[in-house]
Amino acid sequence: MYIKLLCVLLYVGSCLANVDDTSVLPEGFVDATQRSTHTNNWAVLVDASRFWFNYRHVANVLSIYRSVKRLGIPDSQIILMIADDMACNPRNPRPGQVYNNANQHLNVYGDDVEVDYRGYEVTVENFVRLLTGRTQNGTARSKKLLSEAGSNVLIYLTGHGGDGFLKFQDSEEITSQELADGIQQMWEKKRYNELFFMVDTCQAASLYEKFTSPNVLAVASSLVGEDSLSHHVDPSIGVYMIDRYTFYALEFLEKVQPFSKRTIGDFLQVCPKRVCISTVGVRKDLYRRDPNKVLITDFFGAIRPTRVSTDRINVTLANEDDFIVSTAASKKPSFRIIIEPQFPTKFFQLKKLRSM
Amino acid sequence: MGLLSDPSLPTQNKFVVSLAKHVRKLCYAIYLLGVVWFCCLALPEFNHSTYLSENALSPGLVYPEIRIDAHRLAVQLLEELQRERQDHRSTTPHAWIAAKFRELGLETHIHNYTLRYPFGGGKEFHGKNVYGILRAPRIGSTEGVVFSAPYRAPSSVHVDLAPSVPLLMAFADFARRKNYWAKDLIFLVTEQEQLGMQAWLEAYHEGDRSDDGLSANKYLWAGNLPARAGSLQAALNIEVQDLSDIEYVDVKIEGLNGKLPNLDMFNLVQRIMAKEGLTSGYKQAHKQQLLKKRRRQSSSNYELNLQRMVTMLLSQSSGVPTGNHGLFHRYRIDALTITASKRQQSHHKSNSNSAAALLKAIEGIARSLNNLLERFHQSFFFYVIINNDRYISIGDYMPALMAMVASIFIKAYLTWSSLASAGKPTPYGSVMIYLTASLMIGYLGNVLPLQPYFLELPLSAAPLTTCTVASLTIIGIVMPFVVILPPGGLELLHIALLLIYGCSLIVIGLLNFALGFFVGLVTVPLIIALNPIEQQKTNPLSFITFLLNPLIVIYGIVLVMTFYQFPELSIQNILLRAASASMDASAFALIDSVIYGNWLYFAVCTAFLPLWIVTWSLALSKRRLIFRHIDEDMEDLDEIDGLLEEDAADQNKLKTN
C-alpha cells in the first residue's frame, strides 16, 4: 500500500518536474512531430515601398528571391511583389542592376527575375487576395499562390512599417490584425502546412503579434519601438543599399547549399544586436517543432523529405478490385456535345462562290 | 454689420461701455504685445533649427565625381570668353556661347525677345538668351531643372560675373557624361539682368498659348521657345565672381513679391556647401562685414538675430527679387541664387576655395534635385531665416501682425458701439461717396501713367510717374478742405477706415508678410491715436499723418539710403540726389509692376494712398461750421444722458474754445 502511494507520488512529482520534458513521450512520436511533413515549397516575397530613395527595400526582397531560387524553389512557386522598378529607374547609374553592397559584388537583380506583381499592382488588396486564394477571376496562374495542405510557405515582407502596420506604396497600409486574419484563413482553407513569416521593417515585431494560427514561425528584424536600420550607402548611386537584417540574412543564405544541414535555429541567430543595432524578434509559440531541428531548406529550398527503401513494396492499391468495380458500375450519363461553329464560315464561302 | 446693428442686442453692455473708455490703452497694449512677440522671435526659445523634410533629396549621400579637369576647363573657357569680351564691350557674345554649348553636345537654342518700352514715346529693345538642354537619357522629357547664369557685358555697371558662364559650361560638360539624369537639365545664359530671365520664363510657360504670336504681356514680347523640357521642378542661378579665389558663397532667396523658395531647397544648398567646405549662407556678405567689425565691437547674439530678421524682412518688403532666381517663384518653381564672392584682400589666405569646390557643390545639388519625385512640398514656403541653421515658421511670426490688426478691429468695434449708443446721425451715403472718391484717386494712380495720352508726352518715366502720383496726392491733400462731410460723417468714416485698413493689412500681410508688418508697425499707432471727435486745431497727429504720406515715406527711405551710401556728400546734394532717386524708384516700381508683376506699386496706389487720404481727412477733422451748433446740441443731449464721458469732455473743450 505504502509502496503504491510512493509510486504515485513519485510519478506525480516527476510529471510536475518535467512538464515540458518530451523524454517521457514515446520517442517515435517525438520524432514524427519533429520531422518535416511538407510536400512542396512556396514563397511570397513582398517589397511594399516605392520611390528611388527606398532602393534598399528592393535590394532586400531581391536578396531573398535570389536565395530561394538558388536553393531550388522554381519561379512558378515564387510570388514576387515589387512596388517600384529600381533596376530600370533612370536615376540608377547601373541600369538593369541592383546590388546589395557598395562594392558591387553581388547583383541581386540577376539575369532572370520574374516579377509577378509590380508597381501599382502591389496593394494590400492584392496581397490579401493572394494569401487567401481569393484572387479575382482572370488572374494569371503566375499571380496565384496555389499552395495546399502540404506546402511550406515562406512569407517575406519589407517596406516602411510602424507599430502594428506596414505601409504599402505611399497610400495604404496593412495592419497586423489583417495579416493575422489572412493567415488564419490560409490555415482554415488548408493552404499551408507550415509557415515561416519573415519581416524586415521598423517595429517589425508588431506585425506578428496578432497571429493565432498554428504552425507559424515568425521572425522580425526589430522589436516594437525599434527602428530597423540600413546597412550602408553606395556613394556612387547615392542611396542606402540594403537593410541590416536582410544583409546578414543574405550573407548567411549565400553559404547555404541545397543539401545543407543548417537549421532554422542557426538562421534565427544571423543578426545579433551588435551588428543589427535593432533586436531581432522571434515568435515560436505557434510552432510545434524545435527550430534547431528544422532544416533551413524546409522553407528556403525545395527539398522534400524522401525515404530510400530497399524493401519490397506493394504498390497496388489495398482494395483495387473494389475500386475498379465501383468505377465500372457508375455509368456515365449519356450526353451529346454540339459544337457550334466558331465562325460562320459558310457565309463567306457562299459569297466567294457568288463573286466567282 | 447685421450683428452689430441688431437692435435686439443690448449695445449698452456695461463691459463694452467701460472698455470703450479705455479703448486706446487697450489697443496700444495689444499692439505692444505684437511688437514684443516679434522681438521675442529672435530668442532661441522661439525659433527652430532647420531640418530636411524631403526624404527624396538625400543630400550628400553621393561622393562628388567631378574632377579637377572640370575646373581646368572652366579656366580655359574663361580665357576664351575674355578674348571674346574684348570685341563685345556692351553686347553678349551669343555666337560664342551657342557654339560652345553645341560643342559640349547640348541641344542648343537661341531665344529672342523684345521689350517695348512704353515711356518717352516708346522704344524697342531686343535681347537674346542662349540655352542648351541636356535630355535625360532614360526617361521622357517630362520634368526639368534649370541651371542658369547671368551674362553681364563689360560695360555693365554691376559687379563683373564673367566666370559664371564658363563654370556653367564646365558643369554641363560633366553632366553630359553621366547617365543617371531623371530630369532634363537646362543650361541657360541670360542677358539684361532680370529682363532676360523674365522673358525666357514667360516664353517657356506662355509662349505657345497665344495664337497670334503676341505675348500676354503688353510690353515684353517674349515670343516662343523652340524646345522645352517639361515642367520645371527647381532652378539654381549661379553667379561667380572669380574662379580661383572664392571667399564665401552668398545664398539669395528673396523672390518677386517677397516669395521664398521652399526651406528644403535652402537647407539642401546649405548642407552641400558645408560638406564641400565652402563658407556659405543667407546674407553672407552682410555677415562677413559683421565678422570683420566684430573684432572691435561685440554685440550680443540676440541683437544679431533680431538684426538678421529685420534685414531679411526689409529685403522682402520691397518685393523686388534679389537675383534672377526670384522670377521663377512666380511659376511655382523653387529657385535660389548662389553668388560666389571674390576675396577682397589677397594677403589674407585662410579659408580659401577655388571654383573646384563650388563645382562639386553644384554637382551635389544637381544630384539631389535629380532625386526629387515631386515638386518641393514638404517644408515651409513662408519663413524667416535667423541664422543659417535657424528659422521662424509662419505660425510663429504671423501672430505679431495679427495682434496689430486685432487692435484695429477691437477699436473699430468699441468705437462703433459707443457711436451707436450716442445716437448720432449716420450719413452712410456721403461717407460711401467719400470713400469711393479716395479709392478712385488710388485707382487713377494705377491707370493714368500707362494711358496712351500720357505715354505720348515727351517725358521720361521718372518725372511722368512722379508727376501723376504727386498730383493725385495733392488732390488727396486738398480733398478734406473742399469736401466736408455732414455731421456724424467723420465718425462713420473713422470706423470705415479702421475696417478697410485692418482688412488690407491682413491681405497684404498674407501675400507679403514683410510689407504688411512694416506698414503695420509704423501706421498702427497712428491709427489707434486717431480720434476725429477729439481733434483740436493744432494737433501733432495731422503733421505725423502728413509725414506718412506714401510719397514722403518713399522719399524718406531713399534719403536714408542715400545718406548711408554717399556719406561724403553735402546735405543739399544728398537731398537732391534722394529726390531724383525716389522719382526713379517710383518709376521703377511702375515698370516692375507692368513687366514683372511686382505689386508694390499697385498696393501703394490701390490701398495705401486711399487709406492715407482718409486718415488725412480724419486727422484734420474738418467739420461744417454751420452744423457745429447742431453738433453741440447733440452732444448736450449726450451729456444729459451721461452715457459717454469722452464726448462730454470733447464738448467741454469745444465750449472753452
Image (cartoon, rainbow, N blue to C red):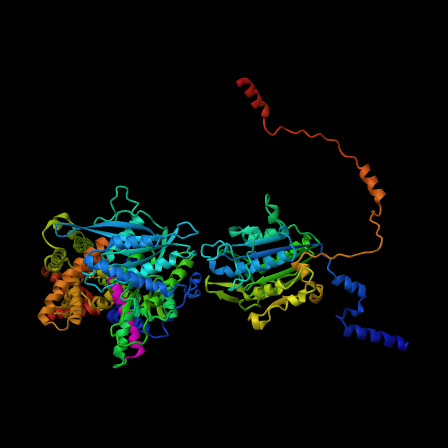
Q: Quadrant of the N terminus of chain B?
A: bottom left
Choose top left, top right, bottom left or bottom right for residue B149. Answer: bottom left
Q: How many marks?
A: 0
- Looking at the rendered image, the quarter that the C terminus of chain B falls into is bottom left
| The one of A260 and B205 positioned closer to us in this rendering | A260
Give the residue drawn at x 47%, y 54%: A89
x then y, percent, for residue B14: 29, 68
Q: Nearer the viewer, residue B628 or B310?
A: B310
* Position of B644 relative to B223 (above/below): below
Start and end of the magenta stretch?
Answer: B299-321
Q: Looking at the image, which residue is at 16% across and 51% down?
A: B118
Q: In the drawing, does residue B255 fall left or right of residue A208?
A: left
Which residue lies at the image location 80% right of the left edge and 67% below the top edge? A25
In magenta segment, residue A154: no
Is residue B315 magenta-colored?
A: yes
Q: Position of residue A96 (x, y in %)?
A: 51, 54
Work out whether residue A254 can be spotted.
yes
Along the line of sight, the residue nearer the viewer: B546 or B217? B217
Tell me residue B651's x, y (percent): 15, 68
Q: Is residue B9 visible?
A: no
